[in-house]
Image (tube, rainbow, N blue to C red):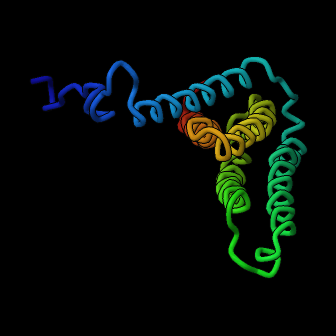
Amino acid sequence: MPPLGLRPILPQSISGKMKGTGMSRRTRVIAASGVGFLWALALLWGAAQFVRLPVFTLMPTIMTAFLAPGLVTAAMVMRVATRRLGDEEMLAGGALHGAAAVDQRVLQNTVEQLVLALCIWPAAAVLLAEAGPGVIVTLGAGFVLARVVFWVGYHRAPLLRVVGFAATFWPTVLVALWALWRLTGGIG
């Protein structure tokens, strides 16, 4: 037995039974999540390496970094409203259904992701010092792309939804970890 009683996790134990030569649904979901995580790593690495803004732009950058995420959220609010206006039952206050209900779920998750970003990105931008302004601007642009993938995926392809969720969630978590690492004396 390996040290500490740990044993290897075989792909079959993660994904359930492998059917034929194709991947199980769970394996595809894990792979899609991995794509979102890799996007997060690439986004943050690219921001740190290539997006250079002067540190004196930190405060204006923090104040404007949420413009693009706010605009995509506004587009989602508008889409839910136009779907509601197009249906007499929903217009009268009835429950959302069909595509309107899907758009409402996308909007709800986007608001949750935006709250996380609002709580984490400004502090991370400050803690990351000279990299902060470029990183937070890049996070804003990445948020929009990931949310659009999530939105399209919710309507068309569940695995795209998984990628979009992970590509929104992981950059925020990773920038928080990076900032905390810098706070505790790490470099980079």
Instruction: Find residue 181 and report its horizontal and vertical position in percent.
Output: 54, 35
Q: Tell me which corner region of the image, top left, top right, bottom left or bottom right, holds residue 18.
A: top left
Instruction: Find residue 180 and report its horizontal and vertical position in percent.
Output: 56, 40
Give the farthest residue toward the left. 1
Give the vertical position of 101 relative to 178 (above or below): below
Residue at image coords 18%, 28% = 7
Q: Tell me which corner region of the image, top left, top right, bottom left or bottom right, holds residue 121.
A: top right
Q: Is residue 73 left or right of residue 41?
A: right
Whether residue 119 appears in this view of the structure is: no
Q: Is residue 125 left or right of residue 23?
A: right
Q: Is residue 155 left or right of residue 91?
A: left
Q: Is residue 29 left or right of residue 76?
A: left
The quarter of the image holding the C terminus is top right
Instruction: Find residue 77 and report its horizontal and vertical position in percent.
Output: 82, 60
The quarter of the image holding the N terminus is top left
Instruction: Find residue 102 and report its horizontal and vertical position in percent.
Output: 67, 56
Residue at image coords 82%, 48% = 72
Give the vertical position of 99 relative to 33 (above or below): below
Give the farthest residue toward the front. 88
Q: Tell me which corner region of the image, top left, top right, bottom left or bottom right, holds residue 100.
A: bottom right
Whether residue 155 appears in this view of the structure is: yes
Residue at image coords 53%, 31% = 32
Residue at image coords 70%, 69% = 96
